[in-house]
Image (cartoon, rainbow, N blue to C red):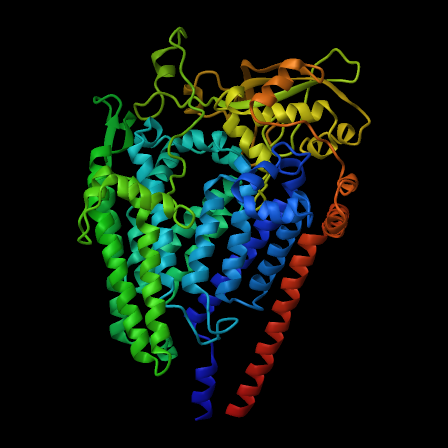
Amino acid sequence: MKCNHAMTKKETPSSYLSRLYLKCMGYIFSVAFISYYAQYPALSSRSGVEPSERAFKYTFPKLFDHVVEGGYSDPDSFAELLTVFGLVLSVFIASGIAHHGLLFLAVTSIYHFLVILGTSFYTFQWDILLIETGFLTGVCFAPWRSLRLNENEQQAVGSWPVRFLLFKLMFMSGVVKVQAECPTWQNLTALEFHFATQCLPGPLAWYAHQLPPLLLRLGVAATFVIEIPAAFLLLTPTVTTRKVGAWMQILLQLLIILTGSYNYFNLLTMALCLPCMVSEESHVGHEKARSRISHVWNVLQLATCAFFLAWTCKQMFSIERFGPTTDPGRQMIGLKLSMTKHECNLLVEHVIPASIVCTLAFTAVTGVRSIIKKKSNRLGSFVHALVCCVCIVVTAIPFFDLSPNLYRSTFLGVNLKPSTWRNIRQHSSNVSHGYGLFRRMTGVGKQSTADPATERMRMGWAGLPPSIVARPEIIFEALIDDSAEWRELRFRWKPGRVDQLPLQAAPHQPRFDWRMWFAALGTIQHNPWLVSFTDKILNGCSIVLDLLDEPEIVAGRHNITRVRANLYHYDFTRLDTEWARRIPGVKMVDTTSPFRYPGQVWTRKLFQQYLPPLEVSNQSLRQFLHQSGYGTSICAVNEDRCKDAGPSAQVLCRIAVSLRNSNEKSWALPLAAFFSCVMVELWGFSRRRKRFTEVKLKSE
């Protein structure tokens, strides 16, 4: 009896994965709040590039009137203290102190509010994904009857909405690549551009860019397989097949982390894989007792997964041979995507309704099993299963944007008009979103027709033209003090100097550097925030100057008198290889080993002027900012912002300023958050070890 008692107290793998998922969400929210807090002064404060006060006033007018107009707090202090409060709640979740559903809804609501205040700097898909994940986790996955999950408790029913969210993210990301009909995705040459043209390349991006074309094109094909057919494995009713799909997604995210800086997005996607590994079986004996029948059943499931993936590969890709037919030894094997946009639309129209219905059925069956097993609170289990089904339906709404024929689908016995669907889509946009990562590859250069290159140079690898990279990059230049020579202004994270390897920024996301990548794809008329940035640095605003990697200018020892911006086309240098010589205009580097630091990382060519020279007294600058909705330029240091605050707002303002000063000197917030999580984890480990020792002594 004592041994059986010890077994029942042991934590099951599924309950461990459930608690681990909730903790991971806490850590990810903590990173998001810390990153937001660090960048708020330069981006969204009253002295920042895009002040949040206008968004606050027009999006939340009643709250603005009560808090700001009522004299309780200024907008900046309110936003910063709310960020700190969200961080404290996130630490509670990450450390395992509390996992209640209301806690997740609270941090999700706070981050959603801050994203709106962040205006266009916080409109990226990972911000939207974090909000949607936090909502589903709080409503469906997190416990509501207790502060945290028990060690032998799992969330079998609540896992289905989270699995369906991961399926939506991956499937839509794969489908939009096919529907966009981008030549780089159709020819599987996207990775020959991606490493150099992604927003913020990682330190290993240069080395990945040197890989042979065959390996890179196999990588693109593997991406399609993982994002489209392997995504369906996440919705299967057996845990073995779901684990196969989850591990494939984790592998893809790890490879992305190695070569790029995408903040917490990859960590969040991997965290979403954890509920896919939660089993519906709760008895420990079923987890450990591997009978012969169960072993054969697992092998059969793995064989089925392999057959399914192999069959889909045959349907999606075609193999061709290129080269002289008289000499087979010199022929090259080419791989192309054979799925057309029409075929992709047909796939969407057939599989999406079936996927929604099957997921609802699996959720209902799991809920019925949960109700039967429980002797008490059956009504609560029924309500929980019903809420999970409703959340799955709401999560599925963006799927209907993939094909217009889905609006006419009657798979649920409902035939609604497109206008009705659009209204439903609009009203559910706060908790359900569509995704489409890397729909089109940017930075694709054009080969000059006037170039008298040989036929061999015009032809790339496997019968395709050479992949010419032309990454657009904005380079700011300035006249410093009384100098008449233009000097390039350096930023911390974006590419600039040609001899510097990219830095690893993740899990932090430098929003300004990231958004400059998007600005380079357009014109200055579509990016007035860059003119606002120019105005701030011309006026010597120290908060905005901190975005630069210029210590002397930030410290006030030198002043910027004039500013201009040019648009360059960047490309990585190449190792001297046979396929690199086929690309016109590339620069080869002499490196005895491919793992050594290259002397020159980038090459760049001036393309055009992006922003004409401006000075602080330029009237056209002031007029452009006024027409774009930017008010009078304000540049107040942190210590001076409380001068105009009312008596009631003075207290909150001084608290916010004190927190800001302590954080700037010693990184107090991230260190305090990390220390709190570590201490609680050590305390929990000590308790579990003590309890395990007591149970072991009793069993003896």
Percent position (x, y) of residue 236? 28, 59
x 34%, y 13%: residue:
455
Point out residue 240 in the picture as x, y percentages from the top left corner.
Answer: 32, 63
The number of numbered badges drawn on the structure is 0
Instruction: Relative to 453, say whether 464 is above or below.
Output: below
If the image is split into quadrants, where does the N terminus sit?
bottom left
What residue lies at 67% left-to-right and 53% top-to-bottom?
A: 670
Residue at image coords 29%, 64%: 363
Residue at the image position 75 percent from the left and 11 percent from the top: 484
The percent position of residue 689, horizontal first and vertical second, equals 59, 78
531 over 282 or under it: above or below:
above
Residue 243 in view, yes or no:
no
> Where residue 285 sits in the image (x, y, percent)?
36, 79
Query: Does the image show residue 178?
Result: yes
Q: Nearer the viewer, residue 622 or 501?
A: 622
Apparent side of residue 593 relative to residue 452 in the rendered image (left or right): right
Q: Nearer the viewer, residue 632 or 147?
A: 632
Q: Quadrant of residue 284?
A: bottom left
